[in-house]
Every structure is written in structure tokens, then in C-alpha cells.
Image (cartoon, rainbow, N blue to C red):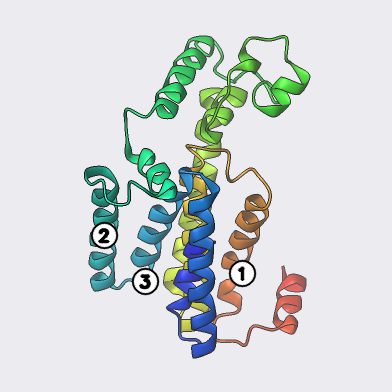
Amino acid sequence: MAAIAFVMALGPFKRWKKVSLGISGMILFYGMLISGTRGAFFALVVASIFAVSLSKNFKVLFAGLLLVLAMFGFLKYTTIGSGNYQIVRLRTAVDPQNDSFNARLINQAKLKELMKNKPFGAGVGSIGLNGIKFNSEKYLSNIPPDSYWVKIWVMYGPVGLVIWFSLIMFMIGKCCGTVWNIQDKGLKVKCIALTSGTAGLFFCSYANEVMNGFPSVVILYMSWSFVLMANSLDGKKLNLKNIINFRYAT
């Protein structure tokens, strides 16, 4: 949400809206820091890369890449801000020796051994919260998946993971193609913000079950819906009448 707000703040909108979006982005970013999560850091990085790439502004793209590298270097190779808990917590996201990260690798190694002869997975509800609730007597169900990608792999196997991953990548690619063809500048910025935000949600779900939780799951699918209907709104005033006409037309 911070990434979406920051991208929208750069759009061709009224000044008060841009200021409001910028302030909202900073508040949301601060909320990410004090939440204690580290996966959101990668969501912000991926969303930023998508945003500058979809803007087709190579100067901004270059500057954005430098900013990402500078942020990574700040966290990885310096001790600046080590007295601040939020910065220290965020710094562990780029530490390969972090205990939490290594625990995830150990759990994934255990799951890999159990999944050797399960090309179609162990079944829905075999792991995660539902696994603990309904199948607590099984050893597999008591291993935390941590990652949503890993959870999909365990439930549906390598075959299901490939199908699921392909569908998600198709949706993101379709949204990117739609954004590139939009002519209306205001609408284009909105769609860039939504597409980059959902891409960030998807990729950071490798670390946590983000895209499958509330309210992220609602934001994800609503964002894709709005972006995919954007071609019918290109050059038109976005109002209720256009949305209703689009709905009946489809």
C-alpha cells in the first residue's frame, strides 16, 4: 500500500491529492517498519522496480535502481541506525545468517523429503493453519510452511505449483501489457500503481503468506480487475456510468 501511494503521488493529479498520497505513503511505510515484518521490504523493492519499468522512463528507472542498491547497501554493509529496533529488524532481511531465515531453510528441507513421491501434493488443508486445525496428527501438517509458495507446493505438488505460478505470472504480464497501451496519463499512473503493488504482494509471498491473507487478497484481485478493465476506460471519465456500461458489455 505504501508503494501504491508513492506511485500515485507522482501522477498528474491536483497538488493536494499528491501531498495527501505522499503523506499516506510515509505513514504506511512507517507502519511497515513498526509492524516487525521483513517480507514487506521485498514487496516495496519489487513494486518499485515494476513501477519505474512500467513508466518507460529510463532516467527514473536508473535512479530507482540506484536507490534500491543504496538501500540494500545501507542495510547489508553498514551499522547506521543500529540503535533503532525497526532498522535492526529490517536489516535481518538481508542477513543470510539470520536464525529465522535458516529455520525456514531447515523446514523446507524436511518438506522436500516428505514431498518426494507426491507430484500432485498432499492435498488441500494439509499444511498451515488448516493443517494444524484439521490434520494435527500428521507430521507434515505440523511443519510451518512460512512461505505461501511453499504452501502451494505442499498442497498441490510440483505440478500444481507450476500451474499456479504460470497463472499468476500470466495475470501480472497481462496487466503490464494493458498498462503499456493506456494513453490517458492519469489512468496510466493508477494502473501502474496497482500493477506494481500486486507484483510486490506476489513476490514477497515467497517469504510469508501475504497474498492469501486479509486484506491483501482483496486488494490483489480487485487491483487486477480494475487494471484489466482499464482499456475500456482509457480516454473516458472514470465514473459509475462507465463502470456499469462495462459490466453489462462483458
- Is residue 184 at all visible to an observer of this figure? no
> Furthest residue to the front?
83
Q: Which of marks 1 and 3 is nearer the N terminus?
A: 3
Residue 145 place in picture, x, y as percent: 56, 26
Does 47 appear above or below 159?
A: below
Q: Looking at the image, which is closer to me, 157 or 192?
A: 192
Q: According to the image, label 3 marks what residue?
A: 55
Q: According to the image, label 2 marks what residue?
A: 65
Q: Is residue 80 left or right of residue 212?
A: left
Estimate the spatial distance between the alpha carbons at disc 2 and disc 1, rounded to whole Å: 30 Å
Residue at the image point whose x is 40% and y is 25% from the top: 99
Q: Residues within 10 Å of mark 2 (few under 14, many from 20)?
A: some
- Is residue 241 at all visible to an observer of this figure? yes
Q: How crowded is mark 1: few (under 14 residues within 10 Å), some or many (20 or more)?
A: some
* Label at residue 36: none
Estimate the spatial distance between the alpha carbons at disc 1 and disc 3, rounded to whole Å: 19 Å
Residue 180 place in picture, x, y as percent: 42, 70
Q: Quadrant of the C terminus?
A: bottom right
Residue 116 place in picture, x, y as percent: 49, 11
Q: Residues within 10 Å of mark 3 (few under 14, many from 20)?
A: some
Residue at the image point whose x is 52% and y is 28% from the top: 150
Q: In this view, does 213 lie to the left or right of 82?
A: right
**Residue type for callout 1:** Met
Q: Quadrant of the N terminus?
A: bottom right
Q: According to the image, label 1 marks what residue?
A: 229
Q: Earlier in the sequence, mark 2 or mark 1?
A: 2
Q: Earlier in the sequence, mark 3 or mark 2?
A: 3
